[in-house]
């Protein structure tokens, strides 16, 4: 949605930025709301691998009237990422550890 390339994301990660990758990007209703086709979870997983899970944060960005409940959407997102070959350790890093670091809770 941002128009950033993979090289852009890597450059930001190289400057100690976290890259937020949202479950909402894969929701079919994204087309009706933003005119964008839903993202392929395999592409999102490939981006996470390329940038490095240590630089990524997983969020739902859900809760709108037209989308699933945030907890259910995040659960589905995690299941898709596991099917795409990311490990539970990598997902835990992006879902728990990195957000805790951002908040100073590490």
Image (cartoon, rainbow, N blue to C red):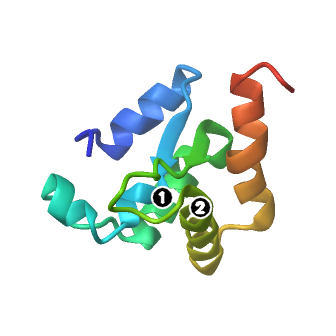
Note whether 42 is above or below 19 in the view shown: below
Q: Residues within 10 Å of mark 1 (few under 14, many from 20)?
A: many
Note whether 54 is above or below 87 in the view shown: above
Residue 36 visible in the snapshot: no
Q: Which residue is mark 2?
A: 74
Note whether 60 is above or below 69 in the view shown: above
Q: How many marks?
A: 2
- Foreground residue among 68 and 56: 68
Residue at 45%, 60% (x, y): give it.
44
Query: Could you say where residue 24 lies in the image, as x and y percent from the top left?
Result: 41, 57
Residue at 50%, 40% (x, y): give it.
20
Query: Could you say where residue 29 lies in the image, as x and y percent from the top left?
Result: 27, 67
Instruction: Give the farthest residue toward the front.
Output: 65
Looking at the rendered structure, the secondary structure element under dot 2 is helix
Q: Residues within 10 Å of mark 2 (few under 14, many from 20)?
A: many
| 67 left or right, relative to 83 | left
Instruction: Give the farthest residue toward the bottom.
Output: 83
Instruction: Give the farthest residue toward the right.
Output: 106
Looking at the rendered structure, the secondary structure element under dot 1 is helix
- Real-space Cα distance between discs 2 and 1? 6 Å
| 42 left or right, relative to 106 | left
| Mark nearer the N terminus (2 vs 1) | 1
Q: Are marks 2 and 1 in contact (CB under 8 Å)?
A: yes
Instruction: Give the farthest residue toward the left.
Output: 35
Instruction: Give me the disc on residue 23.
Output: 1
> Where, by quadrant of the figure, is residue 6 drawn?
top left
| 3 left or right, relative to 14 | left
Query: Could you say where residue 81 lies in the image, as x and y percent from the top left?
Result: 59, 69
Query: Could you say where residue 46 lies in the image, as x and y percent from the top left?
Result: 48, 62
Residue at 87%, 26% (x, y): give it.
106
Instruction: Give me the disc on residue 56.
Output: none
């Amino acid at each position: 949605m941002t128009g950033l390339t993979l090289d852009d994301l890597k450059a930001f990660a190289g400057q100690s930025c976290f890259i937020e990758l949202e479950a909402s990007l894969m929701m079919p209703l994204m087309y009706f709301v933003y005119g964008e086709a839903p993202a392929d979870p395999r592409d999102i997983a490939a981006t996470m691998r390329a940038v490095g899970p240590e630089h990524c944060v997983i969020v739902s960005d859900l809760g709108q009237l037209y989308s699933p409940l945030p907890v259910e959407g995040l659960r589905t997102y995690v299941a898709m990422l596991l099917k795409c070959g990311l490990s539970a350790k990598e997902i835990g890093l992006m879902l728990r550890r990195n957000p805790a670091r951002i908040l100073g809770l590490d």
